[in-house]
Image (spheres, rainbow, N blue to C red):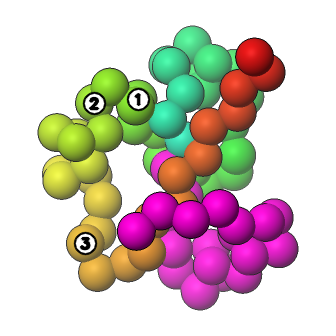
Amino acid sequence: MPKSIDREEVQRMVRAGAQLVEVLPSPEYEEDHLPGAIHLALRHIEDQGVEKLDRNRPVIVYCWDTA
């Protein structure tokens, strides 16, 4: 179930083994992304997530939108 978390919780969860996923479009991800983040474009998250993510570890999904 999705929920919002703050920066400290993200850092704690990543240290504990959570997967950090950025759903930005490719050009934006390549320009700037969080260290260690996995890139899965939002429109492909369902089909690519199965092959790229470990089902046994928590997933943190991040997207920066200035709009």
Residue drawn 52% across the image and 52% down it: 61
> Which SS class for mark 3?
loop
Closer-to-camera residue (4/20): 4
Quarter of the image for the C terminus: give it: top right
> Which SS class for mark 1?
loop
Disc 1 crowd rating (10 Å Cα; few below 14, some 14-19, many 20+) is: some
Closer-to-camera residue (42/31): 42
The label on residue 44 is: 2
**Disc 2 + disc 1, Cβ < 8 Å:** yes
Left or right: where 48 falls relative to 32: left
Q: Which residue is mark 1?
A: 41
Label 3 – label 1 distance at C-alpha: 18 Å
Badge 3 amino acid = Arg
The label on residue 55 is: 3
Residue drawn 43% across the image and 75% down it: 58
- The answer to which of marks 3 and 1 sits earlier in the sequence is 1
> Which SS class for mark 2?
helix
Closer-to-camera residue (18/43): 43
- The answer to which of marks 2 and 3 sits earlier in the sequence is 2
On the image, the x and y values in percent for residue 3 come to 56, 65
On the image, the x and y values in percent for residue 54 come to 28, 69
Residue drawn 72% across the image and 81% down it: 12
Residue 11 seen anywhere in this rendered image of the structure: no
On the image, the x and y values in percent for residue 44 come to 28, 30
Residue 27 seen anywhere in this rendered image of the structure: yes
> What segment is highlighted magenta in the picture?
1-21
Left or right: where 45 falls relative to 14: left
Q: Quadrant of residue 48?
A: top left
State the count of labels. Answer: 3
Badge 2 amino acid = His
